[in-house]
Image (cartoon, grey):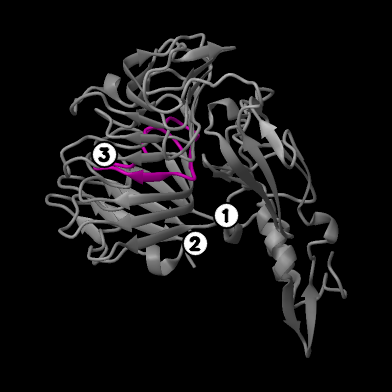
Amino acid sequence: MVQGGLKGHPATEGLLARFAKPGPAMRSVPCRSALRRSAKAERVRGDTMSRRYWRQLAIAGLVVAAGGGVWAVAPTASADEAPRITQLAGVTEGATLSGTARIEARTSGTVDRVEFSLSGASTATWTEREAPYYFLGNNGALVPGWNAAAAPDGAYALAVRAVGPGGTTQQTVRFTVGQQAGAPTPTPTTGGNASAANPSVSNGVATFTANKTIGKLSVPDSWSEIVIGAGVTLRGNFFIPANRTKALTITGRDKQTSQLTGDGPHAKDFARAGVTTEAKIKLTLRNYTSINPRFYHMWAKSAQVIMSGMRYIDNRDVGSNNSDGFSGGDNSLIENTFIDTWDDSAKLYTGDLTIRDTTIVHNRNGAPIQMAWGDYGQGTAILDGLTVISNSSNGYNQGVFSWAGGTKADTRTIKIVGAGFTRKVNPGMVAAPLYAFKDGVKNKTIRVEGGDCSVVRSTSANTFQGANTSGNKVVVTGCR
């Protein structure tokens, strides 16, 4: 509400008009829907002002000097907007769990996100940004839940934090995973050979409970979800047929110990990528480690990929592997993920991509964000909490944002919002170029919107132009 007769006051008419309708000053503020493409549903693009932007104004207040006094536009977050967790459904304090727990945080007030952090014999983190707020998410009415039967016995605590413009609130529930008196001892969930089917398949969910060499496993159309148990390593890759139309989820019970690894030497074969498909589907990858694949960690250029809580790692000999990280299709998401590979970490030529709360280690070979290796593709990247860590002592063959090939005029856009973009350098290492146009690249534009000017501005020191390049440029607007 405008207080103290501000409307009509000459000192404030221009200011109020600025916030009354979208104008040039507001175009650098993306709408909330454009930032929140999540696993729950397609987001509808809009041209309205970010609700979070209004909330930030409401919390901070807006003060304008007028004449000899102070006039205030002071909408503030009310007590009714403060986030509250009204119930943790699906689990009770002190319970003993033995099956699938579908844990939901029910809330009131204004909530931007709910963060789940599981500690104990098995660990997991998960962030939900749209209601209903389920631990490990949901796909419409389908709620996969957390399978206690596949988790190690022991004591657990699940901390749940709701975050909103009016503050934060947290609840913690403690429970136990273990066998009840008189129950038979289950087949071990780590290592060895399981006596039961591996994977076991129930209602379309295929669960691996022991180590196994799967080779190039063609995923059956009847499977809707693949679960890698805690302490389980699968050697091989998941090949998803191109004619598949159903959504697929691949999830681990433990981010650290649920692992998918290559089953042989490096091979330049997309069919041998850790997860590979030409299908135009929704593909959800969450909460496991992909390590040393035979080719890319993931290749799914036609799929909408929702990736959360993942680790992509290559710890083999330096620089000789095409262990590229993320290659998802349009409207894809990388969230709460760690990427440390020896090639490009994320491709920006197969569609729009949002990267949120993610860390990329920039090794000597490869680019954290690759625009293209030629005259093809398109994409806009939204960065909302990306940290890139330089990790080479003897130079780099790519910059953080790189264009590796092509001569036709083309543009890629990087939008920096929210938690923004941060650069770090590991001890004993040198900083990588921020922007790079490789040898022979011409007529390419990298457009950056927002961010910290001191970080994102292109300079002769942070921008590399290779041999026989011309017409390339970096355009930065809306930085602060």
Name the dominant secondary structure of the magenta segment.
loop
Q: In this view, does 432 lie to the left or right of 331?
A: left
User: Looking at the picture, does residue 214 appear above or below residue 427?
Assistant: above
Q: Which of 12 and 235 is in front in this view?
A: 235
Q: Are marks 3 and 1 in contact (CB under 8 Å)?
A: no
Q: Is residue 220 left or right of residue 409?
A: right
* Residue at the limit of the structure toward the bottom, as seen here: 68
First along the sequence among labels 2 and 3? 3
Q: Name the residue at 23% across, 22% down.
A: 269
| Segment tinted magenta in the rendering | 327-352
Q: Which of 171 and 106 is in front in this view?
A: 171
Residue type at mark 2? Answer: Gly
* Residue at the limit of the structure toward the right, as seen here: 4
The image quadrant of residue 13 is bottom right
What residue would you read off at disc 2?
Answer: 478
How much space separates mark 1 and mark 2, taking CA atoms? Answer: 9 Å
Q: Which mark is residue 408?
A: 3
Q: How crowded is mark 3: few (under 14 residues within 10 Å), some or many (20 or more)?
A: some
Q: Name the residue at 60% across, 42% down.
A: 155
Residue type at mark 1? Answer: Arg
What residue would you read off at disc 1?
Answer: 27
User: Looking at the picture, does residue 368 appear above or below residue 303?
Assistant: below
